[in-house]
Image (cartoon, rainbow, N blue to C red):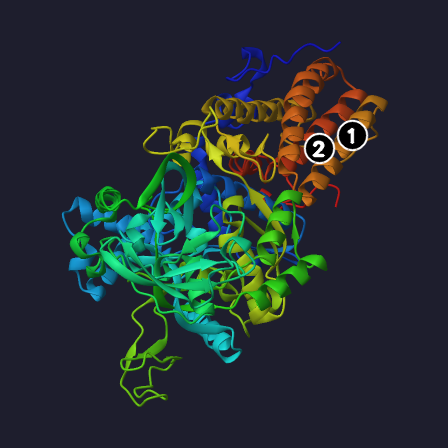
Amino acid sequence: MAKKSDISNGAGKSGQIRNDAGIPEEFLKPYQPAESESAMYALWEKSGYFNPDNLPGERSEPFTIIMPPPNANGSLHAGHALFVTLEDIMTRFERMRGKKALWLPGADHAGFETQVVYEKKLEKEGRSRFEMKPEELYKEIYDFTTANKSFMENQLRQLGASCDWSRSVFTLDERVIKTVYGTFKQLADDNLLYRGKRIVNWCPKHQTSLSNLETERETRTENFYYLKYGPFTIATARPETKFGDKYVVMHPDDARYTAYKDGEQFECEWINGKITATVVKDESIDMALGTGVMTITPWHDATDFDIAQRHDLPFEQIIDWRGKLLPIAGEFAGMNIKDARPKIVEKLQSKGLVEKIDEKYVHEVPVCYKCSREIEPQVKAQWFVNMKPLAEKALAALDKGEVKVLTESPDKILRHWLENTHDWNISRQIVWGIPIPAKLCEKCEFATVDLSDAINKCAECGGAMRKDPDTFDTWFSSGQWPFVTLGYPDSPDFKEFYPTNVMETGADILFFWVARMIMLGLYRTGKVPFRNVYLHGLVRDAKGQKMSKSKGNVISPLTVSEEYGTDALRMGLVVGNTAGTDLNLDPQKIGAYKKFANKLWNITRFVLESGQPTGKLGLQTEKPALTEVDQRLLDQLDEAVKGVTDDLENFRFHLAGEKLYHYLWDEFAAVILEESKEILKTDGAAKTSRQWFLSHALSTSLKLLHPFMPFVTEAIWQKLPQKDSELLMVAKWPNQ
């Protein structure tokens, strides 16, 4: 049985190194990532091979990934490092397989996200965006974002991203805006766009509407109040919204209330005195829920709004845009709703209108995903996209297999969402973003798309028109990312590289982004934007906790790469990480892969030495007659090549990385090299056979490992005197 390898992590045994024979000095000491990584990346960039147009040889088959653009508002986090690693593996693999590989990078202005970040900066400086002119705020955020964008791109380089920087796109580039405006106009022309007063999710702190996807649900235990409303009992968790409730609604088939007719009126005592209430019969009421009776607050509840719309009922705003009660609340006007609630209940109790209070009522409360402030539903005129026709086309594409979600659960979730999608509010009340190219009538509120800024007179009433002050939801422009980056509709890149091969991104933005890219891609181009969807999970700390600054457990990928080397970080992110699952990132695990990089370094030194007795330093390229043992080893290596290739073709990156690790450490270093020591002491055919195999196995292993650990493999490759390609990054993939 073979002994464990004694190949050291240092310079090796004194008798094994003969520097006077020409072994590169770098191999006399442990591998130093910091000394070579920047040089290797500079070498790649200088070659021009990140640009698919410059790749050597005949390459007819394209391979395309459009980078999910990182937000240009801060440093990269561990999730960014994961997507860079996965997408770089795919790109390097396909580039080595002879494809015309394009990985197109970009940066996202990230409208609301970036404005929130900048607002926090303003708060620290004692300033507020509400005290600034819009154009001043925009310029400050633009300068802030531009500086961060450059910083972020250098961080991507540090992580080894082999993307085509010459094609980089920013989501506020002129061509992006032009395409987004074109989509907006087409939606209007196709009657899929409308502006109307609808219930929106309003954040009182940030003073903007949010989509359903931008709200989170907090489980809370609060008081639930049962109130007397004339002859009825109603229930609510929000008595502060009830000042305007003048309609009591019940199901027309509810036998308990047959005595009450639709439209019937009655007087009752209410919060601020007597009111006249009207009975409304509506089939949407759940007879089994509570008393089967409810009053409606149309301005502040989506269900109530729908009922009011169906019955053409008036409605009034109770709570203002900053979360304070309006004059309709009488003595409570101007109060914050949370402060007012107990006082309102106290008044109701004094009038004998409180039947009971459930103090253990558990329910979900929508909150802003950025500030956790409770969302206040408000009626506001906004631009909406009718999503049903777009969703139907996306579902049809999924059914036909035109686009595949590579894991079963997200596929089902995506289908469910598409089957139950709602109209999309694409307006945002923020400065930072792409302005909506529309005009609004100051007199009658008529709205129209105006790309050329030429409409000054209302077509409906003749009133003066003003520019819409709102901006697009970031996800509206980002949803067009695959085709806008490639120069839709008539650029050579669009014709050659669209549809793209794969969209790799986080599972948490399946609805935010992936679904919308599919829908808008089909809508504008008639084709799906990508053929495969690979979703990764969250990157958590070593204990499985979500990283957060408040917990103090944030792991900076750049700090880790500086300590252990980028290759070690990349392997730590990939091995053991299956698609769609969360990853626990343990620095100790990354440290183990630093040792692995050094092991590869020392394997190389041994193989280089093995060729010296023949007078040829480096890899032996002429295949001799192999011994039976070496032929078996070659067959074993060929099987490893097939296995790794199959894993990469089928997006099983974790398995491919694990196979390479175990082959090189447990088989090549621990067994084959140990057995080789005795064989290399002899002369004759067995020695020649083994020298060739060692050379071939090293060359093959470097190629297989390059997508995962590009820096150390390229550094080794550059020191080999005999090789079949100037750069490993464009070397031919094994067994092709």
Is 498 placed left or right of 154 in the picture? right
Q: Secondary structure at mark 2?
A: helix
Q: Which quadrant holds the N terminus?
A: top right
Q: Residue at x 75, y 31 (%)?
A: 637
Relative to 190, residue 401 above or below: above
Location of residue 299 in the rendering, given as x and y in whole percent from the top left corner? 35, 61
The extreme left residue here reads 126
Disc 1, disc 2: CB below 8 Å? Answer: yes
Nearest to the observer: residue 625 or residue 491: 491
Q: Residue at x 42, y 57 (%)?
A: 211
The extreme front residue here reads 259
Is 273 placed left or right of 459 in the picture? left
For label 1, the residue is 634
For label 2, the residue is 696
Relative to 698, residue 182 above or below: below
Q: Residue at x 35, y 48 (%)?
A: 228
Location of residue 278 in the rendering, given as x and y in whole percent from the top left corner? 38, 64
Nearest to the observer: residue 297 or residue 322: 297
Relative to 44, residue 176 above or below: below
Nearest to the observer: residue 303 or residue 268: 268
Sooner in the amino-acid sequence: mark 1 or mark 2? 1
